[in-house]
Image (spheres, grey):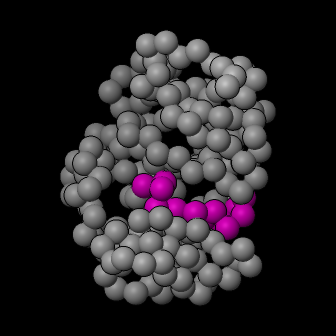
Amino acid sequence: IELIEALGRNADKVTVDWSPNNQIVATALTGEALGSNRQEVLFLGLNGENYKSITVEGRGLRTQWSDKGEKLLYSVHSSRSDSKPELWIVNGTPETMGTQRKFLQLNTWADKCTFSDDRFVFCGVPTSLESGVGFIPSLADTIPDDLYKIDSATGLKSKIDFPDGRVIDSIMVSKDGNKLIFTDKNIPGLFEIEI
């Protein structure tokens, strides 16, 4: 066992979040206080590096790395969004961290999404969300999802045919890139859909 970073009193603010490029191993919500609707996120490296931070427009950070670690998709909620999760994307390498930030104008959590490559993202997006659901995500466990394909370069979104009543729990793209494989929060089993 080897110590990567001593966390001290901040251990509860650090999440193991290994980037596919093997450079970043964790995110830390230990940055500067930026008010109630913004927070600084720090990135920790495998060899003790402290990479450039990003500022996110909310709380309740959830993240998803692109296949090569070049992009970081994240969701946060704030009073601006009526405390519903909002989806954002930024560049994610240590050299480009935080640049090209885009608000994707979808209310969903990053862990209901998957990258098919470093550009395209597929996300389950609840058909409706109550005010404050960002604080208690389980309130959306019975809300059916729509399925979207998002071009992270342009922000263009297209809705994909998806069975009614499904609530995505986890999702990934098949190795050949032709199918989405997902689990449902309310129906046991592993499901696939052609894309």
Closer to us: 107 or 190: 190
The vertical placement of 173 against 53, above or below, is: below
Residue 145 falls left or right of residue 95: left
In the image, which residues are magenta?
109-121
The vertical placement of 128 against 60, above or below, is: below
Q: Is residue 150 visible?
A: no
Find residue 14 and report its horizontal and vertical position in percent.
50, 28
Find residue 54 and report its horizontal and vertical position in percent.
58, 31
Picture quarter with the N terminus: top right
Residue 130 falls left or right of residue 80: left
Question: Which residue is rendered at x = 33% and y = 78% of the image?
Answer: 187
Closer to us: 130 or 140: 140
Question: Which residue is rendered at x = 21% and y = 52% of the image?
Answer: 131
Closer to us: 48 or 62: 48
Question: Which residue is rendered at x = 34% and y = 85% of the image?
Answer: 164
Question: What is the total number of numbered labels drawn onto the structure image?
Answer: 0
Residue at the outermost top position: 8
Q: Is residue 144 visible?
A: yes
- Residue 44, magenta (yes or no): no
Picture quarter with the C terminus: bottom right
Closer to us: 51 or 45: 45
Residue 31 falls left or right of residue 142: right
Residue 86 falls left or right of residue 192: left
Find residue 83 and report its horizontal and vertical position in percent.
28, 45
The answer to which image quadrant residue 79 occupies is top left
The vertical placement of 6 against 135, above or below, is: above
Find residue 163 and report its horizontal and vertical position in percent.
40, 87
Question: Which residue is rendered at x = 53% and y = 83% of the image?
Answer: 192
The vertical placement of 132 against 183, above or below, is: above
